[in-house]
């Protein structure tokens, strides 16, 4: 039984609490939020995906802290789950590692690549485990794609297009481009990270984007360069859609012998098209959140460091996003060095 403390009771904190409440190997020992209404459970965050942040966890017996560092100082907490606004990730995760805790930190790993590198260094110094909650690496349908890219069951990938667009969340730190980094860092990073997971780290990026809601990039389209023999990979991400648009998460991947289409909103989320026929692909139940937490808890129980997502890879995702921002500013391709 591992004793967990969750810091930040917004949409993601609430989503993680839902996951813990369904498990028998975790006790939620403590929660923390600086907002007294959130801490008391009077104000519950809403999810943007069906089934997310349902607020079903029984928190009647937990310890409550009105600031995250107070939870980190609780000697009985073994795993600190950080669901804070992005600029706080690095300092709180480093403090928790230094206090001898294991850490799960929400994506983006950090607000800047420099902060992400500080986190990587802290993880190397400490014996504890640090994992970034890169949920797409665990999402049913996306795990399938990772396997098909690797085993080439339908041939090589000729082209891949990822699309994640929504209306702006319209609340809290998401209104401030400096704080959240815009949709390019907050939302599109899911696809940036998945692209490097499935296809390797890109050599360069060419991005187009604009600001509409915040002072940062709210809508981006990027071409990832994998060299002349590599696949053609494009990702679009943004929260600049009109209010009421909702949330859309899709991919289309064209293999030599088949095309795979994922659409979160479709009744068959994943369809494989080959030999003139469309076949639905059966997927595991659930969302990436429960699978990523399950993976972390199994790693902790087995004394293994998570290898599906490492601190270095989580930092690389932030570094690639920063190259995309540069590409938009300069109007040209930007090379990446890691
Ligand atoms: N994995 C995903 O799909 C996904 C989805 C949404 C958000 N996120 C990420 O999760 C993080 C949190 O996002 P959110 O939507 O839950 O934000 P949110 O604004 O809804 O919640 C953050 C909470 O942290 C609290 N807080 C702020 N400072 C604090 C402090 N010092 N101590 C304790 N509590 C403090 C706030 O009061 C707020 O309740 C962000 O980094 C975001 O990018 C990830």
Image: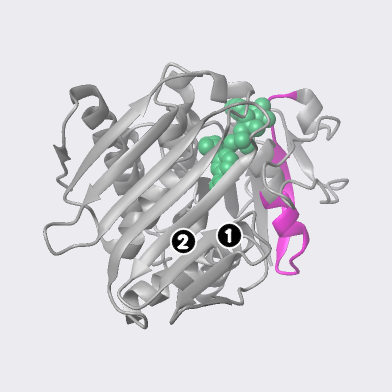
Q: Measuring 63% from the left and 60% from the top, which residue is drawn there?
A: 287
For residue 330, side relative to residue 294 (left or right) = left
CB atoms at circles 2 and 1 under 8 Å apart? Answer: yes
Mark 1: C-beta under 8 Å from nearest atom of ligand 1: yes
Q: Secondary structure at mark 2?
A: helix
For residue 203, side relative to residue 328 (left or right) = left
Q: Measuring 62% from the left and 73% from the top, which residue is drawn there?
A: 284
Q: Earlier in the sequence, mark 2 or mark 1?
A: 2
Around disc 1, counting alpha carbons within 10 Å, would you say few (fewer than 14), some (14 to 19), or many (20 or more)?
many
Badge number at residue 288? 1
- Magenta range is 16-35
Which one is nearer the viewer's eye here, 173 or 226? 226
Q: Measuring 35% from the left and 58% from the top, which residue is drawn there?
A: 160
Residue 325, compared with residue 263, is above or below; it is above
Name the colour scheme. one colour
CA distance separating discs 2 and 1: 7 Å
Q: Secondary structure at mark 1?
A: helix
The count of marks equals 2
Residue 35, compared with residue 302, is above or below; it is above
- Which residue is at the far front? 276
Q: Which residue is mark 2?
A: 137
Residue 190 at least partly seen: yes
Which one is nearer the viewer's eye here, 240 or 307? 240
For residue 290, side relative to residue 197 (left or right) = right
């Amino acid at each position: 039984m591992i004793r967990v403390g969750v810091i930040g009771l917004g949409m993601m904190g609430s989503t993680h609490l839902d996951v813990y409440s369904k498990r028998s190997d975790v006790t939620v020992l403590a929660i923390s939020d600086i907002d007294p209404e959130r801490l008391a459970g009077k104000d519950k965050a809403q999810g943007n995906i069906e089934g997310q942040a349902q607020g079903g966890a029984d928190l009647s017996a937990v310890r409550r802290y009105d600031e995250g560092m107070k939870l980190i100082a609780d000697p009985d907490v073994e795993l600190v789950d950080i669901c804070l606004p992005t600029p706080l990730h690095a300092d709180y995760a480093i403090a928790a590692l230094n206090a001898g805790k294991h850490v799960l930190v929400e994506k983006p790993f950090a607000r800047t690549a420099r902060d992400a590198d500080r986190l990587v260094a802290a993880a190397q110094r400490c014996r504890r485990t640090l994992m970034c909650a890169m949920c797409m690496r665990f999402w049913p349908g996306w795990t399938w794609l990772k396997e098909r890219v690797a085993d080439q069951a339908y041939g090589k990938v000729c082209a891949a297009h990822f699309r994640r667009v929504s209306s702006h969340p319209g609340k809290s730190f998401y209104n401030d481009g400096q704080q959240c980094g815009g949709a390019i860092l907050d939302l599109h990073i899911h696809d940036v990270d998945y692209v490097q997971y499935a296809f390797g780290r890109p050599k360069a990026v060419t991005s187009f984007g604009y600001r509409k809601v915040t002072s940062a990039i709210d809508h981006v389209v990027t071409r990832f360069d994998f060299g002349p023999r590599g696949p053609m990979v494009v990702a679009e991400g943004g929260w600049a859609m009109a209010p009421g648009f909702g949330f859309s998460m899709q991919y289309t991947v064209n293999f030599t012998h088949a095309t795979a289409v994922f659409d979160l909103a479709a009744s068959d989320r994943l369809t494989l098209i080959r030999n003139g026929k469309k076949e639905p692909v059966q997927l595991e139940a659930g969302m990436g959140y429960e699978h990523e937490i399950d993976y972390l808890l199994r790693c902790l129980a087995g004394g293994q460091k998570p290898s599906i997502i490492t601190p270095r890879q989580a930092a690389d995702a932030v570094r690639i996003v920063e190259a995309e921002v540069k590409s938009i500013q300069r109007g040209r391709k930007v090379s990446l060095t890691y």
